[in-house]
Amino acid sequence: MKISRRVFMGTAVGGMAQALGAAPIPSGTRPVPVVDITDLYHPPQDPGDNMDLIMAYALPEVDLRAVILDVTQRYRRPYVNPSDHAYDDPHGQRDPGFIPVAQLNAIFGRNVPCAAGPFEAMRSPDDEMRDAPAFQQAGIELLLRVLRESPEPVEIVSFGSLRPLAVAYNRAPGLMRRKTRCAHIAAGAMPPGFLEWNVLLDVHAFVRVLRSDLPLAIYPCAAEKSAFDLGMHNTYWQLPDLSFIRRMRAPLRNYLVYAIDRSSRVDFLNALEEEPSEEVMDRVCNRPHNVWETVTWMAVANRKLVRRADGHCALIPAAQAMPGDTILPCDLIPCGVAVRDDGQFDVTLDKTAKRCRLFRRDNPEENQQALREAMPALYTSF
């Protein structure tokens, strides 16, 4: 669907939500209250974080209560050492991702609160980080306030170091236990073999959360030797290109183009209203895209990856599965967890375990092929 500039301008900052109304929530389903902790930067370190945040706003099953920016000081600075880490990049300075949150608030007609957590790593698993600057305390305070004010337990998703979650637990363990329905942790390697990126960001935070008594769902981001292998328990998969962005509604398309092209425009709301050039669209769309987050949102929203009777694949509400659908297994299985001080951890599959669950997909290649069709279809439906 192409929206003319004249029509789009009429629905811009004040009324984009009417143009981009989310799909109706399935009958009998209540939106799940969610806090999204994300290592989202501007310009992005990984534009997948910008894409992932769309799910939090657009899925009708999700009631997004807050966005906590999980920032690490080291990655706010320019690229220096080419051999330092495979995830470093040469794009220079960046800061917490307040701009993409503001853009999505404008697009969806929302006012989701957003704050940053501490920039430095924890000094021990018990660190409450009360000496962090006031600005960096705001993310912890926002998370605890949302839990305190919620009449029901909240789902917490964490895509990053786990630092805000760990510090909040250290400050208010009773509140965290009472009001956390599940903490969804995208981090770690399974089988264990090396320290995955999110664990390396703050080993103490990872250890604190895994040793807590919070209910956990663990989504390893790496297999035994790499974050880019397809395994049964890690969540990674790859889109060969981003051509589907061309088919998205104009505001969301422009939001992703602004992020993926690492725009430095200061008029970031005006950027949502302007047609990108074909040169920019080619630059954005003709590139592969690594994905780790999809299955976490599937679990939070209770969506299933299915192959329909006509052969097409889709991400649908579980209640809308039809008799001819084949559900492609992406499950959370009960387990016990033992984490060492260095961040390495082991799991024991145990059907009687109640606190922790581990992601599993039966056929990683089939899972990737299905998601390559289903995820673009979902994003173009928003």
Image (cartoon, helix red, strand yellow):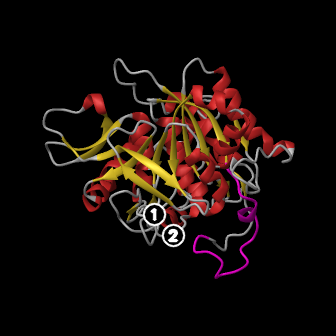
Residue contact at pointers 2 and 1, CB within 8 angstroms:
yes
Circle 2 or circle 1, nearest the eye: 2
Return the residue nearer the eye: 124 or 64.
124
Task: Kindly identify the amino acid type of the residue bearing the numbered disc 1.
Answer: Ala
**Mark 2 crowdedness (10 Å alpha carbons): few <14, some 14-19, many ≥20:** some
Q: Secondary structure at mark 2?
A: loop
Range of magenta residues: 70-87
Distance from Cα at disc 2 to Cα at disc 1: 9 Å
Write the residue at 27% across / 62% down: 365
In this figure, which residue is indicated by the disc labeled 2?
Answer: 194
Tell how many labels: 2
Residue at the spot 65% in from the left edge and 28% down from the top edge: 174
Q: Amino acid at mark 2?
A: Phe
Q: Which residue has dot 1 on it? A: 222
Q: Residue at x 42, y 54 (%)?
A: 347
Q: Secondary structure at mark 1?
A: loop
Considering the image in quadrants, where does the C terminus appear?
top left
On whether residue 203 falls in the magenta region, the answer is: no
Residue closest to the eye, 262 or 175: 175
Q: Is residue 275 visible?
A: no
Quadrant in which the N terminus appears = top left
